[in-house]
Image (cartoon, rainbow, N blue to C red):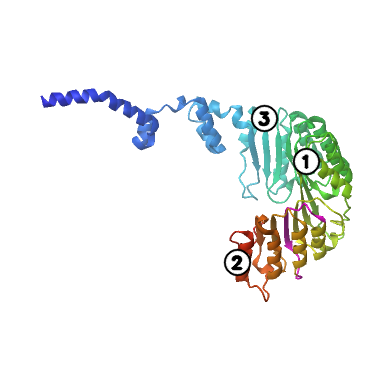
Amino acid sequence: MKRARQKVVVENEAPQTSQKSKKQKTCLYGSVFGESDLHASMDWGSLPHHVILRIFQFLPLVDRARASSVCRRWNEIFHIPDLWRRFEFELSQPATSYLKSTHPDLIQQIIKRHADHLQYVSFKVDSSTESAEAACDILSQLVNCSIKTLGLISTAKPSFMNVSKAHFASALTVVFVNSKSLSSIKIDDTPLDDPSLKVLVANNSDTLKLLKMSSCPHVSPAGILCVADQCHGLKELALNYYILSDELLLALSSEKHVDLEHLRIDVVSENPGQVEFHSIKKQSWDALVKHSPKVNIVMYFFLYEEEFDAFFREETPVTHLYFGRAVSKAMLGRIGMNCPRLIELVVCANGLQPLDDELIRIAERCKNLTAMGLGECEVTCRGFIEFVKMCGGRLTQLSIMEEVLIPDNDYSLDRLHLEVSKHLGRIWFPDMMPTW
């Protein structure tokens, strides 16, 4: 009788055990079964479409290609347009570069099956001219594209500059003419020219919002002015100082133009005395800020000390300043007097004269300053503490090399960090190496 009762109990509980096992199989595959049981119990080809798509979106391209060989259905999903909206072509020469490269067969497959799906495209090339020319060859074949963002990136020296201007312009023309909806273009260090910009404007003036084209020596002030005159939705612009003009700033300030959000200006000189830098009128700067009061104006300087004479003689609404070479005390003094909108200042080198007075003037006049970086400069501990005291807690970033600070009779380096920490409202120490 006991056996019979036990048997009845087991038979009654069997359905519950079966349901529990199914639940475990559904939710805890790996922990309940071994690998062979898992593959036997799951039909991977029957996973919902959106689940496979989601998995593929997280996989690197190589793993995605391998997964596409699981079954025919996964291979079909591998080719759906959503997975090919964004792609980065990596081009390098194996004999001279350590960078990985997109396989030629995959490139041809993309051109053949997915050119019209591409929307966010970038090309990363090594320092060889062959890789840059290969990128242009691919661009020339994107005749059915609808690209929204395009980026050309040189990982080492600017290899696109070695491509013939005609070849580069022809490749860009294909994309500019066929896309019709370009909103973001990053083509620094390329042989871009004025005719190419006119083609860009003629076909994408209503959609272009971002244009980064620093170090494009074939573009003239008239060429970039054409962009500003026609592309009224442009919000971000990066260019070299030599094509910046009063006319350009006034065009960006017209009633038709949307508020500019970001203007980056690279001021570069390779050989001292070779370039004569022009001045921009205060009225032109004022017009831009009146039209776009929240615009960030970022300036990168790579000049020699004797080449700064044209800058900051009048009030300039720059917000971020970076000096990659030595800058004189006189220049820093003018910044303190004429840059009231300054938010961030980085000085990589100055010399052996203490900058106490210049920093204090910057703290007094630049009420928006929140970030400061100093490299090969000199500041007395007393002067630095006075600067920090005047700025207070608004200095959210303060990166000062330890060798910049000169101990004096009032403050040692040990006491300095305590005083600075007190005024900042947080623990602070000088840096042992640059962080900018």
Above or below for 200 versus 311: above
- Rounded to the nearest angstrom, the CA distance separating label 2 from label 3 is 60 Å
Q: How far apart are marks 3 and 1 (CA)?
A: 32 Å
Q: x%, y% of residue 377? A: 72, 66
> Is residue 352 rendered magenta in the image?
yes
Residue 332 appears at what percent x and percent y? 79, 61
Q: Quadrant of the N terminus?
A: top left
Q: In the structure shown, which secondary structural element does the residue marked by tag 1 occupy? A: loop
The percent coordinates of residue 389 (x first, y second) are: 68, 63
Q: Mark 2 belongs to which amino acid?
A: Leu
Labels 1 and 2: the sequence-earlier one: 1
Res 174 label: none
Answer few, some or many: residues within 10 Å of disc 1's Cα (few below 14, many 20 plus, some between 14 and 19): many
Q: Nearer the viewer, mark 1 or mark 2?
A: 2
- Above or below residue 72? Residue 262 is below
Q: Is mark 3 on a helix, strand or loop?
A: loop
- Marks 1/2: CA distance? 42 Å
Of the residues shown, which amino acid type is indicated by label 3? Ala
Residue linked to disc 1: 260
User: For the residue marked with disc 1, what is the amino acid?
Assistant: Leu
- Where does the magenta region start and end? 338-353
Would you say 33 lies left or right of 51 here?
Answer: left
Mark 2 falls on what kind of element?
helix
Quarter holding residue 188: top right
Residue that carries the numbered disc 2 in the rendered image: 418
Residue 367 versus residue 216: which sits nearer the camera? 367
Q: Who comes first in sequence, dot 3 or dot 1?
A: 3
Q: Which of marks 2 and 3 is in front?
A: 2
Return the residue nearer the eye: 244 or 178. Answer: 244
Residue most extreme to the left: 1
Res. 139 in view: yes
